Amino acid sequence: MTNPKYVFEALKRASSFLLEHGREEGAARILLQHELGLSYSGLIASMRDEISEVQWEKFWTNIEQHTQGIPVQHLTGTEEFYGRKFRVNADVLIPRPETEELIEETLQLIDRHMLKKELALADIGTGSGIIAITMKCELPQAQVTATDISQLALKTAAENAEELNADVDFRLGDLTKPIENEKWDVILSNPPYISYAEAPGLSDSVRDFEPHHALFADNEGLALYEKMAKQLPEMLNKPGIIGFEIGYQQGVAVQKMLKDAFPDAFVYCKKDINKNDRMVFAIIE
């Protein structure tokens, strides 16, 4: 098979190859943009340009790796989140669009319920740092702290914070342990919430290539919410806000945990753009 001469030929061949192997054809465009260093509009404008043999070979290697399950984000090394580019790798969870909705709702709640600007905000289980860094970028006056049990994840998060000029205090430790002796105005978390029983149903790109400690939790995925719900009452200022990202079947259970921990709080579940339960918030007046 001869190598394609033009960019559009390379894209067409790669898209067909991905479809034949049960992958999304859109990955071909992302990987080609990455290889050529082009934006989407730049790629469209370059369709009739020639593609070099070196560019084609590197691009095709990534296409073949993706058919084996390696996530596109691990091949490009980045993922966009809330309009910013974050570094990702096998040590951290790949950012999901649903987490942007957690950010959006939290910012609206802060605007409605918090009078002071210099908030103390904690992100528990930060991974690549997307929540903590985004909140710091959106609320520059806030004091933002983030925890994670993985030193490698914190290394990635710190690199992201440096690249995005976000002053975040990263601390190593299990859940709230590194921040338990302080008081917080806002506590956010997107913890591992998939039950081990769900593992066979996950795509191989997730199951085989993303860190299991960031995906799975005991007790049908609810173990870490239970643990945090018991710890947070001692840590939250009044007024205070808690925001958790959850699995789509966990809304009722996580609401009950927070209501038991904060009997006077307003606790509610919010659906994501796909109409699935995705976030639980507690507002403590």
Image (cartoon, grey):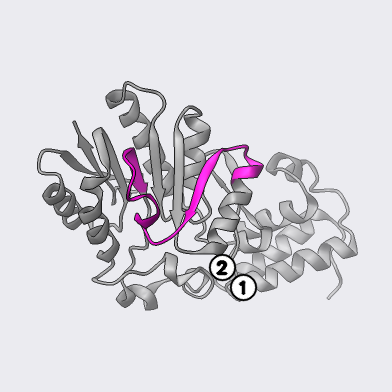
Query: At which x and y percent is residue 266?
Result: 16, 37
Residue in the image at 31% along x and 31% along y: 109
Cα separation between marks 1 and 2: 7 Å
- Look at the numbered discs 1 and 2 and tell me whether their residues touch, using CB distance below 8 Å: yes
Q: Is residue 6 visible?
A: yes
N-terminal label among 1 and 2? 2
What residue is rendered at 32% in x and 48% in y?
181
Q: Amino acid at mark 1?
A: Thr
Check disc 1 and report the residue beneath it.
67
Looking at the picture, does residue 263 appear above or below residue 87?
Answer: above
Q: Which mark is residue 23?
A: 2
Query: Whole-percent x and y of residue 15?
Result: 66, 63
Task: Using the image as rendered, state which of residue 114 and residue 108 is in the foreground.
Answer: 114
Position of 36 relative to 204 (above/below): above
How many tags in the picture? 2
User: Which residue shows up at 13% across the image and 47% down it?
Assistant: 259
Position of the C terminus by quadrant: top left
SS of the residue under disc 2 = loop
Give the answer, above or below, for where 137 lies relative to 155: above
Residue range corresponding to the magenta coloring: 161-188
Q: Position of residue 21 (x, y in %)?
A: 59, 74
Mark 2 Cα-neighbour bin, 10 Å: few <14, some 14–19, many ≥20: some
Q: Is residue 86 visible?
A: no
Residue type of the residue flagged with mark 2? Arg
Disc 1 element: helix
